[in-house]
Image: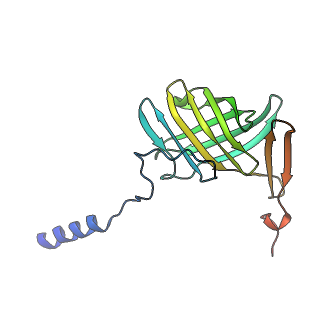
């Protein structure tokens, strides 16, 4: 009976597999293609998303201007949040970070209404990077995509109704 239990234990351990598609010890590349990546060094430790969920970006406008909120699950118990203030492509903007991230500065390499990407660094954060596709749902279930250009300011576009959740095909 002991041999059977030992064999069963060995078989159970051998059949467990870890998701190796995301290596948490490697930083994602600094891209601007909407690959849904997030990573940074916090006090020298690597934090990346992808293994515990994809990062998400949403946008809104309030009395102080246009903001993009990036949330990135980096381990089983932690999600990092960055709130970018008036992010414009090819420029620097301040961000407010949650928890240990603290506040800092981000350089936006792309913000065209479909993808927001850039790099960031702050109090204890170095080599931060993100490349995320984003949409924001409206009350009807469609998506409003917001983007900034340095010349035109804030622009909004609605997705066609075929993409809305509440309509049946």
Percent x, y of residue 149: 81, 40
Residue 101 quadrant = top right
Q: Is residue 16 above or below residue 62?
A: below
Indicate the position of residue 125 as horizontal and vertical percent values: 51, 30
Left/right of residue 76 with respect to residue 143 in the rendered view: left
For the residue pair 87 and 63, the one nearer the viewer reads as: 87
Residue sticking out furthest to the bottom: 169
Which residue: 83% across, 29% down? Answer: 63
What residue do we see at 59% from left, 37% from top? 119
Q: Residue at x 47, y 35 (%)?
A: 41
Residue at image x 69%, y 29%? 93
Q: Position of residue 80 (x, y in %)?
A: 55, 39
Closest to the observer: 43 or 112? 112
In the figure, is residue 162 to the left or right of 114? right
Q: Is residue 166 left or right of residue 68?
A: right
Q: In which quadrant is the C terminus drawn? A: bottom right
Left or right of 164, for residue 23: left
Nearest to the observer: residue 97 or residue 91: 91
């Amino acid at each position: 009976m002991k041999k059977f239990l030992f064999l069963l234990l060995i078989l159970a351990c051998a059949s467990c597999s870890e998701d190796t598609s995301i290596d948490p010890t490697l930083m994602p590349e600094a891209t601007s293609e909407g690959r849904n990546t997030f990573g940074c060094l916090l006090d020298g430790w690597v934090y990346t998303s992808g293994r515990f969920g994809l990062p998400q970006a949403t946008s809104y406008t309030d009395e102080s201007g246009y903001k993009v909120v990036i949330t990135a699950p980096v381990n089983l118990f932690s999600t990092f949040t960055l709130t970018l203030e008036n992010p414009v492509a090819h420029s620097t903007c301040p961000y407010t970070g949650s928890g240990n991230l603290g506040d800092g500065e981000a350089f936006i390499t792309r913000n065209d209404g479909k993808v927001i990407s850039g790099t960031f660094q702050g109090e204890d954060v170095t080599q931060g990077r993100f490349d995320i596709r984003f949409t924001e749902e409206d009350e009807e279930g469609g998506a409003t995509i917001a983007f900034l250009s340095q010349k035109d300011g804030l622009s909004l576009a609605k997705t066609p109704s075929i993409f809305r959740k509440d309509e049946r095909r």
